[in-house]
Amino acid sequence: MNNPKNELSPEQREELLKTLKTRFEKHKNRHTGLEWPAVLEKLEARSDKLWSLSIMEETGGEPDVIGHDPETGDYLFCDCSAESPKGRRSVCFDREALDSRKENKPHDNALDMAAEMGVELLSEEQYRALQQLGAFDAKTSSWVQTPAEIRKLGGALFCDRRYNTVFLYHNGAESYYAARGFRGLLRV
């Protein structure tokens, strides 16, 4: 993730766009009524967004279009990997939680990683909407945006899908598990 210019080479760009197009065409149920040429046009105009998508892909997120915001014209890309992205697991919630650990610290935290990638963590509502498009996190879980009142008290929220139901849970923000990561949302 440490590309100081946040730019892709022409080869990387071409390969990423090919991957995104293939995924878009394979999973039409995630974006009914949307057409790839319109999405491609937006992507070609925003190289910074392509870099974010490449990091989502590199860390195992399998980003795909999950919607379109008619007010802004943005296409919404989300991590659609079956399980929480492998390259973003074993992280606590935020910097404060990471700094509070005296030993056995995780390698990073979800909020800083998301900011570095140029994405946002899903809200509970966005997570539940994603689950309408498929069954995600049947074996893993994903941190989600947490209200300030909960975070001030040391907690953070995460979701998963078990028994064909989406569950919202809480944990100490400093906790981290091999099966918990985060999913990102990117507006293009």
Image (cartoon, rainbow, N blue to C red):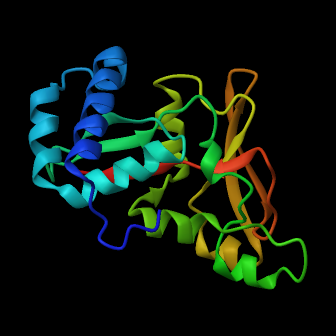
Q: Would you say residue 21 is visible in this rendering?
A: yes
Viewed as shown, does residue 120 lie left or right of 131?
A: left
Q: Is residue 7 left or right of residue 95?
A: left
> Where, by quadrant of the figure, is residue 3 drawn?
bottom left
Q: Position of residue 143 (x, y in %)?
A: 64, 54
Identify the residue at image location x=55%, y=72%.
Answer: 112
Quadrant assignment, res 120 = bottom left
- Taking the spot 88% from the left edge, 83% from the top edge, the residue there is 102
Q: Which sits in the foreground, 148 or 110?
A: 110
Instruction: Using the image, determine if residue 107 lies above or below residue 170.
Output: below
Q: Position of residue 80 (x, y in %)?
A: 48, 33
Q: As displayed, is residue 41 above or below residue 154?
A: above
Q: Nearer the viewer, residue 128 or 65?
A: 65
Vertical placement of residue 157 versus 84, above or below = below
Image point 77% across, 67% down: which residue?
Answer: 106
Measuring from the top left, give residue 10's x and y in whole percent: 19, 47
> Does residue 64 appear left or right of residue 125 in this picture?
left
Q: Residue furthest right?
A: 103
Observer able to see residue 67:
no
List x then y, in percent, for residue 85: 59, 43
